[in-house]
Amino acid sequence: MSTLWYSILGLLFMAYFALGGLDQGVALLLPLHRGDGDRRAALNAVGPRFLGNEVWIVGAVGVLIAAFPRLEGELFGAAYPVMIAVVLGLIALNAGVQLRSRGVRRAGFDALITAGALTLAVGWGLLLGVVTHGVPMTADGHVHGFAPLTSPAVWLTALVNVVLVVANGAAYLAWRGPDPRMRRVLTQAGPVGAALVLVAAAVWYAWQPPGISHPILATALVVATAAALVATRFVTGGRAFAATLVACALPVITVALARYPGVLASTMDPGATVTVDSAAAGGDTLRLLAIGAAPLLPVLVAAQVSCWWLFRRRESQPTPLYW
């Protein structure tokens, strides 16, 4: 049961890194658009999907807290400053997008949107880096300090995530947005992102973090991520966007499978490493979640799919319905 919920948790985070990464990428590219009209058109391009994209993080954090309370406590403890920044970034991005058209100082809201998106892209990349690095957990089973946040490899992982979401946003806007320059941004961000992914993987291999159980599988997924980014130079439209979605989602499953059955390795005491089973809540709690929460997951997926289907065509004129 714990492995099943760990798989569900991974799928939810993959969905958020891909679809939430789309929102972040569009927001990070906002300064490249000239004038309020172009910026509003870029936000309108993602408008019908924006709130649906952000719902995935609510589901992921809910499952993390309910099904894996120990993992949530120790991981957030090891990256507490990052989690504070992520929460603030979520607030800034969502508030900025929804308020920018309700006032006259839109430049300030545009800056807030971009700052929030950058904070999120860096923050989630740092969190992936912390999981890959391992945490300073002692034999008492608790984390002490924020040592992983001083690692250059962790910050390199954050940089990789920023480039991934930029490529994701550029691919979407090249497909559905009004600015033809986004295709040029994508053709640059794709290869740069692929190179950074491979460099980051090489750095982690040289670093040799503890608790990596499946390095060959991790290598295959890293290569797949880089290949998806390189493919954006040769495909266009929806296929390029699909490639960047895959590239944004794969790092989550790469880190998770590289450590499985461990989830949080200790850099101080190998015996203190947290596994899937030891991180999970009790069997009764997991069964209760299966009865109460699991039926909601297909509804969430169906709502997301229907939203993308309903708004599958590009709007000829920006609509004031969204932003």
Image: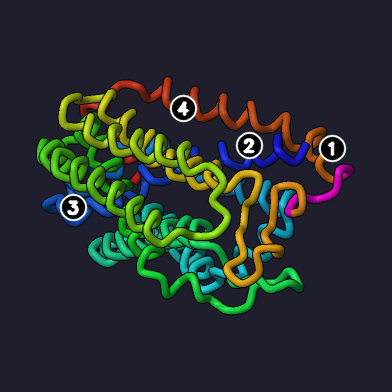
Q: Write the residue at 21% across / 41% down.
A: 190
Label 1 sits on what residue type?
Answer: Arg
Is 4 displayed left or right of 35 in the figure? right
Q: What is the spatial separation of the Cα atoms under label 1 and label 3, in whole angstroms? A: 51 Å
Using the image as rendered, state which of residue 261 and residue 23 is in the foreground: 261
Few, some or many residues within 10 Å of mark 1 (<14, 14–19, 20+): some
Q: Is mark 3 on a helix, strand or loop?
A: helix
Labelled disc at residue 310: none
**Label pair 2/3, CB-CB below 8 angstroms:** no
> Where is mark 1, residue-wise?
287
Can you identify the residue that label 2 sits on? 7
Residue contact at pointers 4 and 1, CB within 8 angstroms: no
Q: To which residue does mark 4 refer?
A: 307
Could you tell me which secondary element the residue under label 4 belongs to?
helix
Q: Is label 1 in a helix, a strand or a loop?
A: helix
Check disc 3 and give the amino acid type: Asp
248 w.r.t. 80: above or below: above
* In-front residue for pair 169/263: 263
- From the top left corner, tell me how far across and down residue 20 is, in percent: 43, 45
Res. 99 visible in picture: no
Residue contact at pointers 1 and 2, CB within 8 angstroms:
no
Q: Give the range drawn in magenta.
A: 279-284
Q: Which sits earlier in the primary sequence, circle 1 or circle 3?
A: 3
From the viewer's perspective, tell me whether residue 203 is left or right of residue 147: left
| C-alpha span from label 3 to label 4 | 26 Å
Q: Which of marks 2 and 4 is in front?
A: 2
> Is there CB contact under 8 Å for labels 3 and 4?
no
